[in-house]
């Protein structure tokens, strides 16, 4: 089979004029293109016969997984990001997915990272020259990074007088972060520090505002805005932000002939702020000629000191260490719905007071907790008798309580399904509803896959849609199935959905698109008839 290839493309701010030649070339040579819907629209003039996979804003993991899956079949797959794919883009995530699969460069799919113009550069060019000196980028999105850690980074960058580019500064739900950031910056910088706000750089709805730190929140700031905050030297001239590099300290900018000759500009008296070969100023030995050997010894001694400091900090605990957010669900079992007081006590003791617990309609307790040792946590909860389940885009099996076990004939089948497919990754969260009798009090037919046990066998429903005006129950595709045949059939349906489903594609949409799943044909649901209620509501 032909070796597949992943083309991880940063296409810049969005306009074709600012895409690199290689980026355009890679898009054209790809067999398929995978990207956030807005990004696909931005490169539409370059799309010819490529297959397109579009997903929503928060579906980055699904995009990376689908790209790797397609590349492993021998395709050339373009994964697109605006800006540069290695700056808050898809490059790192694709590598993470490959690493999880044991990928090696010499034998696995090829990977080519194609750089693009990042927002700090494109927005900086529209503002003037605000990034002429040391700068950093900080994302204010706390969906993946704890807010306490982001605040420390903002504080450190502000104190160190970096020019700062803020990505993802505000969204519909995240409104406080930019306010808190302004407060931190004002501790170190003057209220009249220049600030540039650029929305949709080099796109149709481009907006550019130059303001100051005190008044920056008076203007519209959203997810499409990049905020660039000047350092203590940045100034505004004729509507442009300029950050001096420092030439004015040693050069006379309005004179043709300079006071300092080239051989004088690197002397200590011309730059008293410099370390001069790594020797600290207070040692006052700058006049002694330094050989390369002396300089090497100085550098080595500093490295040893720094290493010892790092070791000491590790022993004490590194201030900026980022703990993982561990998310999972627990239940007393597939059929059992009773949690004992001892289990609740074990749950609280294991996850601690900082965890977030959410009880769901599916009789699950979802847990979100910061931890650096998830294996110890899962072991403790398993010993307490909990069934532990992953969350997200996985198979979720929901079963009734079988009338407290009195109607237990089909429990072996649902438990076997849980062992075989419960919690496996799929394109979009899939719910399998399982009822132990024909009363169907647990509403099995309203799930992606519905199973109802009756004395003669199992009835199987596929493709329910639970929301919207055209909501409907699943399509009855089989009746009276024997237990072993049912389990085998459901496993094959899940495998088909996993293999052929598109990222973020719900099962009912998948069934409608492919038309046939394991020999069962999709049937169009009749249009719902809207009837005026007698009460007039």
Image: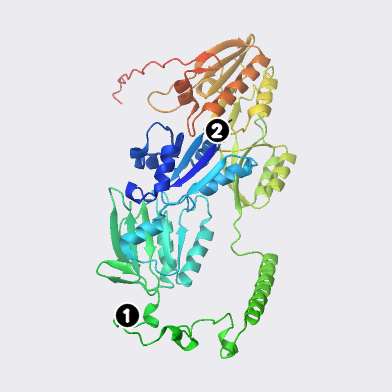
Q: Quadrant of residue 298?
A: bottom right
- Looking at this rendering, what residue extends furthest in the left direction? 238
Image position, residue 434 (x, y; %): 60, 22
Q: Quadrant of residue 458?
A: top right
User: What residue appears at the point 67 percent right and 77 percent down from the top-left corner?
Assistant: 301
User: What residue appears at the point 61 percent right and 60 percent down from the top-left corner?
Assistant: 321
First in residue order: circle 1 vs circle 2: 2
Image position, residue 247 (x, y; %): 38, 78
| Position of residue 351 in the picture relative to residue 205 (left or right) | right
Q: Which structural element holds mark 1?
A: loop
Image position, residue 246 (x, y; %): 40, 77
Q: Which structural element holds mark 2?
A: loop
Image position, residue 121 (x, y; %): 39, 59
| Residue behind mark 1 | 253
Q: Residues within 10 Å of mark 2 (few under 14, many from 20)?
A: some
| Residue behind mark 2 | 74
Q: Is residue 83 above or below residue 411?
A: below
Can residue 257 be seen here? The reply is yes
User: What residue appears at the point 32 percent right and 18 percent down from the top-left corner?
Assistant: 531
């Amino acid at each position: 089979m032909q070796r597949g290839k992943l083309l991880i493309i940063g296409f810049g701010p969005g306009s074709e004029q600012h895409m690199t030649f290689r980026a355009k070339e890679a898009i054209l040579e790809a067999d398929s293109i995978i990207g956030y819907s807005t990004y696909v629209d931005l490169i539409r003039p370059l799309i010819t016969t490529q297959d397109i996979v579009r997903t929503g804003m928060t579906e980055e993991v699904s995009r990376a997984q689908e790209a790797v899956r397609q590349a492993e079949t021998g395709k050339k797959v373009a994964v697109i990001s605006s800006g540069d794919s290695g700056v808050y883009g898809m490059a790192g995530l694709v590598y993470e997915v490959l690493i999880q699969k044991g990928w090696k460069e010499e034998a696995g799919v090829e990977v080519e990272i194609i750089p693009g113009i990042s927002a700090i550069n494109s927005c900086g060019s529209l503002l003037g020259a605000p990034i002429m000196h040391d700068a950093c980028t900080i994302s204010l999105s706390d969906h993946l990074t704890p807010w306490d850690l982001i605040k420390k980074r903002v504080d450190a960058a502000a104190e160190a007088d970096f020019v700062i580019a803020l990505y993802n500064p505000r969204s519909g739900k995240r409104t406080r972060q930019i306010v808190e950031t302004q407060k931190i910056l004002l501790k170190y910088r003057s209220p009249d520090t220049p600030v540039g706000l650029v929305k949709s750089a080099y796109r149709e709805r481009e907006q550019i505002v130059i303001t100051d730190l005190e008044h920056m929140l008076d203007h519209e700031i959203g997810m499409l805005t990049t905020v660039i905050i000047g350092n203590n030297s940045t100034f505004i001239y004729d509507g442009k932000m300029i950050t001096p590099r420092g030439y004015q300290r040693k050069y006379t900018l309005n004179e043709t002939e300079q006071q300092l000759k080239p051989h004088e500009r690197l002397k200590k008296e011309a730059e008293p702020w410099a370390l001069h070969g790594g020797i600290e100023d207070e040692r006052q030995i700058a006049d002694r000629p330094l050989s390369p050997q002396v300089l090497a010894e100085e550098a080595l001694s500093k490295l040893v000191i720094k290493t010892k400091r790092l070791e000491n900090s590790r022993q004490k605990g590194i201030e900026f260490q980022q703990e993982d957010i561990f998310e999972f669900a627990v239940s007393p079992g597939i059929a059992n719905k009773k949690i004992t007081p001892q289990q609740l006590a074990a749950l609280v003791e294991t996850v601690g007071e900082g965890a977030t617990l959410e009880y769901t309609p599916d009789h699950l307790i979802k847990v979100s907790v910061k931890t650096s040792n998830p294996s110890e946590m899962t072991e403790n909860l398993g010993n307490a008798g909990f069934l532990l389940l992953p969350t997200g885009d996985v198979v979720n099996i929901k079963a009734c309580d079988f009338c407290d076990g009195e109607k237990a004939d089909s429990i072996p089948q649902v438990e076997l399904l849980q062992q075989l497919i419960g919690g496996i990754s799929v394109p979009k969260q899939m719910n399998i509803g399982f009822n132990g009798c024909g009363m169907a009090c647990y509403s099995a037919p309203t799930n992606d896959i519905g199973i109802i046990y009756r004395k003669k066998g199992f009835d199987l429903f596929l493709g329910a849609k639970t929301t919207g005006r055209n909501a409907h129950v699943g399509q009855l595709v089989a009746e009276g199935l024997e237990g072993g045949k049912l389990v085998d059939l459901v496993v094959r349906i899940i495998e088909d959905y996993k293999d052929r489903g598109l990222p973020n594609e719900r099962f009912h949409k998948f069934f409608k698109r492919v038309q046939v799943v394991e020999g069962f044909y999709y049937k169009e649901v009749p249009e719902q008839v809207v009837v005026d209620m007698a009460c007039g509501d």
